[in-house]
Amino acid sequence: MWTPIDISLVLLVQKVQEHRSSPKIGKTRVVTTPVIDKSLPWAFFDGAGQGDPPIGGDGGVIFINETNKNSFKLGLGRATNSKAELSALWATLKLAKDKQIAKLHIYGDSKTVIKWAQGKNNIRAPHLQNFLKAIRSLQSSFEVILFNHIYREFNAEVDMLS
């Protein structure tokens, strides 16, 4: 049974997490609608790990065009959020490769994973480095691959899959 103190703590933790992960001006979060480049096939990915121990899942959607899309969702069992996000990116790339898509624009709501995929940051956790190696191996099979961060609000379809 939840007590008012428990609920207050949960709300406080959520506010702290939002504050840490959201750019803010004053007390208002600034979120701009992303411009999705539809000149290439485009994809969204997302992963989630929750609980103690964390149970993870991931999902993705690849749009060949406005009317032709492929989606997936996977249960991962025990997985942190980072592992689930990396798994979702890997699975999205694998599906695109299997569909013989040569050019792809990828959108994800994890800035960290997007930066890892772009080669801007390195993974320090040894258990995640093999995921990044597998992702980089798949990346090399594309003629063009672009990565962009989007806010969670614009990743809703995939968020529900993960």
Image (cartoon, rainbow, N blue to C red):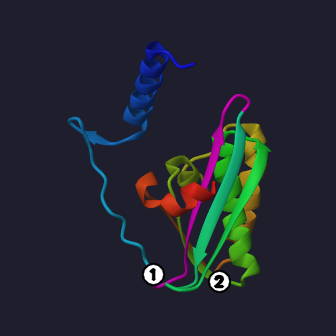
Q: Nearer the viewer, residue 159 or 36?
A: 159
Q: Nearer the viewer, residue 73 or 137?
A: 73
Badge 2: few (under 14), some or many (20 or more) residues near its Cα, within 10 Å?
some
Is residue 41 covered in magenta? Answer: yes
Determine which residue is flagged by label 1: 38
Q: Position of residue 134 (x, y in %)?
A: 76, 59
On residue 102, the disc is 2
Q: Dots 2 and 1: beta carbons under 8 Å? A: no
Disc 1 packing (10 Å; few <14; some 14–19; many ≥20): few
**What is the three-letter code of the residue carrying label 2?**
Ala
Mark carried by residue 12: none
- The image quarter containing residue 36 is bottom left
Find numbered disc 1 in the image and state the secondary structure of the residue it sits on: loop
For this view, does 24 lie left or right of residue 103? left
Is residue 21 at all visible to an observer of this figure?
A: yes
Q: Identify the residue at image location x=39%, y=30%.
A: 15
Q: Secondary structure at mark 2?
A: loop
Against 92, residue 108 (above or below) is above
Quarter containing the N terminus? top right
Identified at 67% across, 38% down, the residue is 124
Magenta stretch, residue numbers: 38-53
